[in-house]
Image (cartoon, coloured by chain):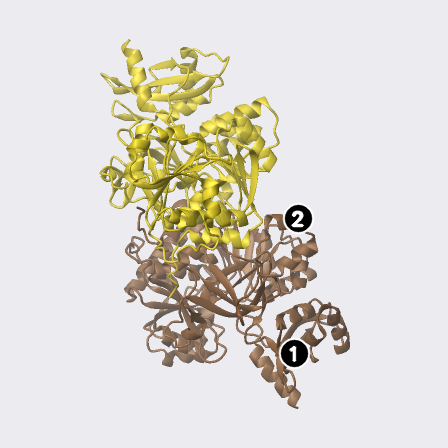
Chain colours: A brown, B yellow
């Protein structure tokens, strides 16, 4: 038969060191752009692994990170799981009480913290008793002033770690390798535990042509934070394949991003629509040569068609939609056109590219409506359910597991249609669907239509209770700077595109739309706000 | 944690049917080119699976195939493993006694046979008692005359199979899925058993950019026979990704291949050097537009540099070397240039492309010399050992397992060097190395140098016993049609390229060099032949 060699992550960093020692990780630090070869990164990673063991980190222990996309965070991405511990990336944008909840819930033993994030942890330090050591990742030679204790300087710590350290070779492929908490609609965040096997398989998928096609030839810039579903797995895949990685660091602006892409000749980058809206504005204001980009990968929430069109047609930058979530590692669906779709007109292509796309090899999906699986006709709506080796089977020690994981499937809470070509399109979150007179109205469809209007910067559509129809849609819009539009104009603009009963009952003009820490519309807060406004 | 969904092959054919029902399998039959959609292939495959069960095939039973690269063989590739049985592809070029040995050793229950291969099985039918049924894969409407019994007509059989058949969903990922026997230097062929897991992982690897990058966008023509390491896994990967597959059928010539590539706009094809030598001759004789080819994949044995150069520089067809064996599924190493190597001169690139290349993601390798692991300096020679999830751990019920599988590694019997860039180069088979005065001479290096001579069509270098030096090299060469060269000329030609003691003691001119059934030099036979010649 075949060898039972486990799918563990150690092979990734070893391959980078052995086959691509000269390739680079480029890190934007507070002291400017620094370049590290994979030879250096691999050595620093080994030293970190050894240092963590010396701090008392044992097999299976959780080590938390509160950090931006940097070379040090990348080292932690491998040192922690490859030594048998669990990499717990913490979303620094969460509320302090949620951060202390997840540190306690995960029982983190050590925290690695970027120096600018120190105040956040200092504020909760008395509430996280499991943490035995704090390691500060700073670009400075000295430790900053801090009330944390015991505290270590990252560079000093790893300089004492041994370069002869050897990763254990007996890690089970189903052993935990990482974890990430995802916000819940109500209550505390929910934890997802990734395994070595799930991470290796997801990384293989990222390297496949029919998925993201990440390769040695790429210069990849993960904009999506490393505390958000492992920066979509790009650091793992990138290191494994010897990809040049460009780490944008903390506090970058659209201008900084555009400059990094231009200067480092970045070939692929990944992030949420908010980032790309910002980049688009920057491209409209200033001139850049971004022709090195093979594509921009966009996920997290649906990108408006107008934005896809601007990137593809105006700036000639291929724009690829993808779909996933913390529970799915995250890649599930990606909007690569099929070979014969390349012959479609630009407008027809745009229709497909605005959808989330086709299931990547390795997973299974089904769409469940009120009466079982729905037809793949682009019309019937149902909840997307997913199954596969890089999909979570539970929330970590959490009773809410039963809500989402049923009969061996993850029920995503996303309402979708699938067309005859197998292209999935997000219609709504189950909880954001507007149920009007027994029929469903997609808030996302209305939002996309509104965002295609030249005066509109952002639009969110929510349900408000209605006596006769149970629920009715209300649109909340933010106009572009110096742009103008009236409610009547916007309704007229929507009319030719939708059935009459889909049209919003009202359009509210706002300065901004409340968003989650990862840039998604916070519809619950918006509903409360609108409710208040209506009642006034 | 993560779902424990098994890596089984059923997902491959299901994905093709669900997402790529319109894509095609193009099959060259005795009645011309036939086209089948994946919708049709998936239906025919289900019907075949059902029919085999009705013939008594149970979970774990072996079903043998003796067939060319056709759409029917492709259906068997999925119907057999997806129903829980084991696909045993039989090399029809083996000697009859070896074929009956492996049918008996594998205990095949049913044989699927291409009609032109019938005589081969009729001749051994009384020696294969485990076989309970023969299914004839013919393009004709009627069964051919045959002495086999009980015998079934493939098309008639599957027309009675049910399209409602459902593949079992409880197959273990480590269950056997396929098997293939490989020739041994002496004695009977040795069997390798592939699992669902190994096949799925190998297929993922084939889809990765840093490997063969097979994708939906490809039109793939597997020239390498489906009875030889599963046509290098291309049928599995191709179906999974919805790739257009072009099956060349039986008895194709270089002319037919060139026409198929041109007409079907083939983007990638794969086979052994002998095939590409033939194609090269055809391209020199007649004009074709093969510009659709992304690349030619070449493995099985080392391609001469002159051939690589001709394809790349004269015909502008990228030519990619790869390395593997039956025991390795087969892909291990592939000669994709690194991003920074693209800036080398054509000659420098050719140096790398003539090597077997870099380890694909997912495997581990080491090179073991007389004193442990050798340096990666392009000079030190050692035996290549490989480990990973698509590498065999044993020969099926065979005592020779202990020779090759040691300490969890497969010792390949190939002597290699690895250079500073991690590019592996086959120097020789351990048993073909020439040991002269305590030092090693690579027969392969001498062969490649000779084959770069304009008069030489093929060259094989072997060791002959020598009183003083233990062994000395002798070159056997076949000249091109109408070409001439003397022994002295050829020695002069080699002189500037090698140390004096590497130069062959003699050069023998021959009409042809004996080859194995898969086109590799049969050096054992050649040694016997030369020995005889010398003694005369």
Q: Is residue A237 visible to us here? A: no
In the picture as drawn, the residue positioned furthest to the bottom comes out as: A536
Residue B191 appears at what percent x and percent y? 31, 39
| Residue in the image at 47% along x and 67% along y | A326
Which quarter of the rendered picture does the C terminus of chain B lie within?
top left
Which quarter of the rendered picture does the N terminus of chain B lie within?
bottom left
Residue A355 vertical placement versus A503 (above, below): above
Which chain is indicated by disc 2? A
Badge number at residue A473: 1
Residue B260 vertical placement versus A189 (above, below): above
Badge number at residue B414: none
In this orientation, which residue lies closer to the viewer: B45 or A178? B45
Looking at the image, tell me whether mark 1 or mark 2 is earlier in sequence order.
2
| Residue in the image at 29% along x and 13% along y | B532
In this orientation, which residue lies closer to the viewer: B407 or B16? B16
Check disc 2 and report the residue beneath it. A343
Circle 2: is it few (<14), some (14-19), or many (20+) Cα within 10 Å?
few
Q: Are marks 1 and 2 on the same chain?
A: yes
Q: Horizontal placement of A224 versus B135: left or right?
A: right
Q: Horizontal placement of A211 versus B180: left or right?
A: right
Residue A159 appears at what percent x and percent y? 34, 59
Mark 1 to mark 2: distance in Å? 37 Å
Which chain is indicated by disc 1? A
Circle 1: is it few (<14), some (14-19), or many (20+) Cα within 10 Å?
many
Residue A295 appears at what percent x and percent y? 59, 54
Label 1 SS: strand
In the picture as drawn, the residue positioned furthest to the top comes out as: B536
| Residue in the image at 41% along x and 27% along y | B519
């Amino acid at each position: 038969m075949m060898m039972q060699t486990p799918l563990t992550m150690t092979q990734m960093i070893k391959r980078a060191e052995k086959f691509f020692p000269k390739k680079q990780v480029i890190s934007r630090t507070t002291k400017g752009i620094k370049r590290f070869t994979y030879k250096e990164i691999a050595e620093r990673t080994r030293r970190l692994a050894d240092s963590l063991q010396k701090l008392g980190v044992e097999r299976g222990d959780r080590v938390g990170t509160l950090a931006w996309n940097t070379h040090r965070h990348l080292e932690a991405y491998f040192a922690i799981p490859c030594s048998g511990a669990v990499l717990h990336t913490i979303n620094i944008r969460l509320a302090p009480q949620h951060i202390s909840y997840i540190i306690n819930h995960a029982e983190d033993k050590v925290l690695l913290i970027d120096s600018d994030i120190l105040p956040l942890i200092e504020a909760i330090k008395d509430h996280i008793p499991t943490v035995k050591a704090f390691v500060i990742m700073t670009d400075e030679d000295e430790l900053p002033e801090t009330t944390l204790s015991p505290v270590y300087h990252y560079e000093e710590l790893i300089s004492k770690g041994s370069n002869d350290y050897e990763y254990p070779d007996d890690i089970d492929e189903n052993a935990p390798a990482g974890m990430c908490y995802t916000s819940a609609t109500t209550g505390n965040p929910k934890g997802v535990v990734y395994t070595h096997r799930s991470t290796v398989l997801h990384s293989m998928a990222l390297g496949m042509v029919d998925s993201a096609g990440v390769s040695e030839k790429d210069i990849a810039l993960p904009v999506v934070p490393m505390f958000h579903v492992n920066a979509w797995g790009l650091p793992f895949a990138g290191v494994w394949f010897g990809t040049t990685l460009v780490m944008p660091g903390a506090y970058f602006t659209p201008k900084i991003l555009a400059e990094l892409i231009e200067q480092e000749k970045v070939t692929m980058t990944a992030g949420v629509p908010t980032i790309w809206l910002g980049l688009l504005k920057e491209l409209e204001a200033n001139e850049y040569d971004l022709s090195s980009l093979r594509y921009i990968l966009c996920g997290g929430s649906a990108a408006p068609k107008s934005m896809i069109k601007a990137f593809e047609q105006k700036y000639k930058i291929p724009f690829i939609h993808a779909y996933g979530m913390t529970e799915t590692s995250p890649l599930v669906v990606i909007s690569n056109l099929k070979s014969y779709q390349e012959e479609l007109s630009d407008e027809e292509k745009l229709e497909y590219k605005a959808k989330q796309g086709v299931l990547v090899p390795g997973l299974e999906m089904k769409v469940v409506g009120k009466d079982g699986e729905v037809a793949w006709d682009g019309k019937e709506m149902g909840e997307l359910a997913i199954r596969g080796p890089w999909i979570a089977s539970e929330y970590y020690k959490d009773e809410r597991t039963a809500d989402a994981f049923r009969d061996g499937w993850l029920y995503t809470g996303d309402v979708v249609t699938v067309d005859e070509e197998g292209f999935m399109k997000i219609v709504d979150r189950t909880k954001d669907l507007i149920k009007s007179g027994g029929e469903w109205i997609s808030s996302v469809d209305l939002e996309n239509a509104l965002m295609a209007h030249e005066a509109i910067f952002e639009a969110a559509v929510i349900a408000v209770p209605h006596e006769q129809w149970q629920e009715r849609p209300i649109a909340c819009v933010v106009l572009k700077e110096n742009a103008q539009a009236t409610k009547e104009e916007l309704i007229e603009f929507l009319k030719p595109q939708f059935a009459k009963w889909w049209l919003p009952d009202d359009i509210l003009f706002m300065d901004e739309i409340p968003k989650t820490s990862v840039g998604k519309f916070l519809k619950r807060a918006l509903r409360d706000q609108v409710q208040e406004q209506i009642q006034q």
